[in-house]
Image (cartoon, rainbow, N blue to C red):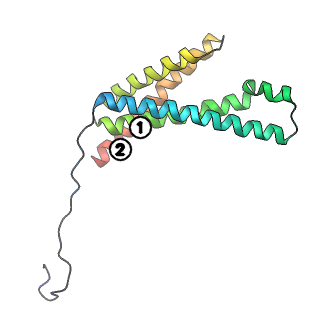
Amino acid sequence: MNDPENPYAAPHAELRETPRAAGSPFLAVLAGFATDTAGTFVSGIALTFVHAVWMIHSGATADGIAALASTPALSAANMIVGTAWSIFGGYVCARIAKRRELTLGALQGSLSMLLGLWLSARAEALLDLLLAIATIAAVVAGSAIGRRANLRRG
């Protein structure tokens, strides 16, 4: 008891959170890659489903729904949401690793880029190259955000 006048007062103590230890770099890259890949995949399915329902509701024919994958608005929405998942994947990687965040983020971005190029069915090499660079940049940006959070929170 720190207050001699009030014996019922709560004791005063400084509470400190001990910083969490750094995680495995391998698990950090794997968790970030899984977050990016699974999030992008599930979001892509959800966006396609919502877009298909919207097209059906607005009276689209079967041919219009079959051409759904080539809709520019859906492609743009998938790119934006995929980029957001890439940033979040980089953040997850950095928060788990707690060291060499940008290096591990670049490694994770490279893995995501390779998967994207492997799954790409486009004949537009320039667009594939731009998306690959954007993927790495998004993951490294997420890693930089995670690094700042690591420095702030410990």
Taking 118 as reference, is 15 above or below it? below
Do residues under tags 2 and 1 come within 8 Å of each other at their CB atoms? yes
**Residue underneath mark 2:** 149
Amino acid type at circle 1 is: Tyr
On the rendered image, what quadrant is the N terminus found in?
bottom left
SS at badge 1 = helix
SS at badge 2 = helix
Mark 2 vs mark 1, foreground winner is: 1
Instruction: Give the camera-side residue of 20 and 45.
Output: 45
Q: Quadrant of residue 72?
A: top right
Query: Given the current orientation, which residue lies at the most extreme bottom position?
Result: 5
Where is residue 105 drawn, in percent x and y?
A: 39, 28
**Residue underneath mark 1:** 91
Amino acid type at circle 2 is: Ala
Which residue is at a point 57% across and 31% down the rendered structure image?
A: 41
Taking 117 as reference, is 60 above or below it? below
Q: Earlier in the sequence, mark 2 or mark 1?
A: 1
Distance, label 2 to label 1, CA atoms, is 9 Å
Where is residue 42 drawn, in percent x and y?
A: 58, 35
Which residue is at a point 78% across and 41% down the rendered structure image?
A: 54
Instruction: Give the camera-side residue of 112 and 16.
Output: 112
Q: Which mark is residue 81?
A: none
Taking 36 as reference, is 132 above or below it? above
Q: Residues within 10 Å of mark 2 (few under 14, many from 20)?
A: some
Which residue is at a point 65% across and 12% down the rendered structure image?
A: 124
